[in-house]
Amino acid sequence: MKHSRRAPLAFPAVAAVVLTCAVAGLTLAARSEHASAVATTSKPTMLLDLRKRVRYVFVIYQENHSFDNYFGTYPGAENLSTALAKAHGRRQYDPIGKRWIAPFRIADPDIAGPSQARAVVYRKFDHGKMDDFVAEQERVSLAKGYDAADAQRIGELTMAHYDCDTIPYLWKYAHAFALFDHIFQGMTGPSTPGNIEAIAGQAGQTQWARNPGQAAAANDKGRGVPIVNDLNPAYPPYAADDRDAVNQIPQRYATIMLDLGGSADRLARSDTDGVRRDLQAVAASGRKAIPWGWYQEGYVSPTSAREGFEAHHDAPQYFAYLRNNPVFWKNVHPVQAMLGALAKGRLPDRGVFYIKGGSRNEFGWKPANRNPKVQAAYRGDDDHPGAGDSDHQVGEAFVATFVNAIAHSRYWKDSAIVITWDDAGGFYDHVPPPHFERCADGKPCGDGQRLPFILISPYARSGAVVHDRGDTASIVKFVETVFHLPAMAELPDERGSMPEGPRDANPAITNLLGAFDPQRLSGALAPIPAIAAEIPGAVVNAFPPKMSCASLGIVPVTLAHDRSPSGFAPRPLDPRRTIH
């Protein structure tokens, strides 16, 4: 049975417990700040102020970490010390080692990559009990050919967490600006659905509703919609080392790029099946186009990419009308072009800009670990775990490089920066996700696990933990809110297939407004200065980071028995990459 997305999400029965724990975890400062904001400022006034202050939205979109994996001991958040965590998988059985595993802190940024395949993650959830991450990962790793010792290492790794001694830049941003602790993946599964959700607020439900014959296979392996796997897009470019024998079918539904296009949408004439009426409606609005850009590492041209370019992360590349119409595709660029545009002040007078790393960084960064195998295998900067991908300190250096560039630029005073991740990477998170609707495989179409989610802006609530609920669709909902755009769900081709389709009109999903300080937006309180977001270049480019919990003045919450299991290693002896 399908439930309308126009109604609030059907949250699990534990929602009341989540809310109780979340409120109990608020710091006194955040409580008083939140109370003051609600008492003194109306929502319409705040919206007007937001639209006056914010002209640039930057989305830095990383890979594969759950909230607990990166912020599981962050003070004031729904973290691993709460009653909810104790009731949902904080102690999990290791069948190979025949022992119990609790969450444990690690400091090594070069780790294996657990499986985040859709079917595997649902088994890890264990019907919302969130208690089968270790055992299920061990089963999957054994099936992929790892020996028992390595399968055990990868299984136990799902319970590991970091803090500000290892990823200090991310904790610094959370501490100085606003951290959301109830933002979920839009779709349970690996990277591709998450990247598409970030621009479409769905992963193909509209297309499935209109074309049932294009349904994704129940085994989450083949082509079809909604997208639940990592097949490459139907169109180039592809890196030479990143080609699939079978590619995904073209995607044909609205994206935020279409909504931003305004009257320029009339110039889109190729491959417009599925969005023809959407394009006509936006073009007929007479709205001036709002500039946008997708900046991805390794991209060279419409037909060429370097090693490290991950086509299955390039969300616009999946959409026929975006890829095959120059009015849209001219906005896809190499990632370095953003640094030049910021430094030289060449961005337009407003806009939305997505920034994406790759599996081979272009900045010359190398992991701190001098082991030749680590040096060769962990060269990426998109934060994706696993051999052949990213060192996590290199990953946060990528984020800091772009945050610094924005903070140093003339655009800082008009900006909002979203930092988030596309999926949870197969790591444990204790908060059961909300489930709604049904996908073609019989499982819910939403939501997936909790993700880290930080909002940086001169107008943010400083040091706030924001408990508002949302998912990846909150990114597009925020863009629509800032630029006063119609929800994609209200466009004619989408409206005809609802409740299947984008979730940006769903009132249960936050538009991120809770991260902003109404007094800063109104001018009654000074904006947060750019220096609060800056990390010196000498620090950003040093590995390991010259920053720690102590230097930041942050005290992570203390967990009982927060020690790695005996014999644990973050990387298997067999260095092959986990097959998702």
Image (tube, rainbow, N blue to C red):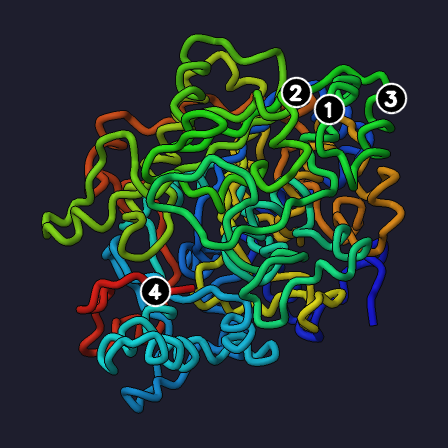
Q: Check disc 1 and report its element: helix, strand or loop.
A: loop
Q: Does the residue at mark 1 contact the one at mark 2 (Cβ under 8 Å)?
A: yes
Q: CA distance from mark 2 to mark 3?
A: 17 Å
Q: Is residue 340 above or below residue 239?
A: above
Q: Check disc 4 and report its element: helix, strand or loop.
A: loop
Q: CA distance from mark 3 to mark 4?
A: 48 Å
Look at label 4 and name its amino acid.
Answer: Thr
- Image coordinates of residue 42 in percent, x first then y, are 81, 34
Q: Which mark is residue 536?
A: none
Q: CA distance from mark 1 to mark 2?
A: 7 Å
Q: Does the residue at mark 4 contact the one at mark 1 (Cβ under 8 Å)?
A: no
The residue mark sitting in front, 1 or 3, is 1
- The residue that appears at 24% across and 65% down in the rendered structure is 570
Which residue is label 2 attached to? 327
| Badge 2: residue crowd in 10 Å (few <14, some 14–19, many ≥20) | some
Which residue is label 1 attached to? 268
Query: Is residue 549 rendered to the left or right of residue 39?
Result: left
Q: Earlier in the sequence, mark 3 or mark 4?
A: 3
- The residue that appears at 27% across and 32% down in the rendered structure is 540
Q: CA distance from mark 4 to mark 2?
A: 39 Å
The residue mark sitting in front, 4 or 1, is 1
- Observer-nearest residue: 313 or 421? 313
Look at label 3 and name its amino acid.
Answer: Ser
Q: Earlier in the sequence, mark 2 or mark 3?
A: 3
Q: CA distance from mark 1 to mark 3?
A: 15 Å
- Image coordinates of residue 553 in percent, x first then y, are 33, 44
Q: Is residue 489 above or below residue 80?
A: above
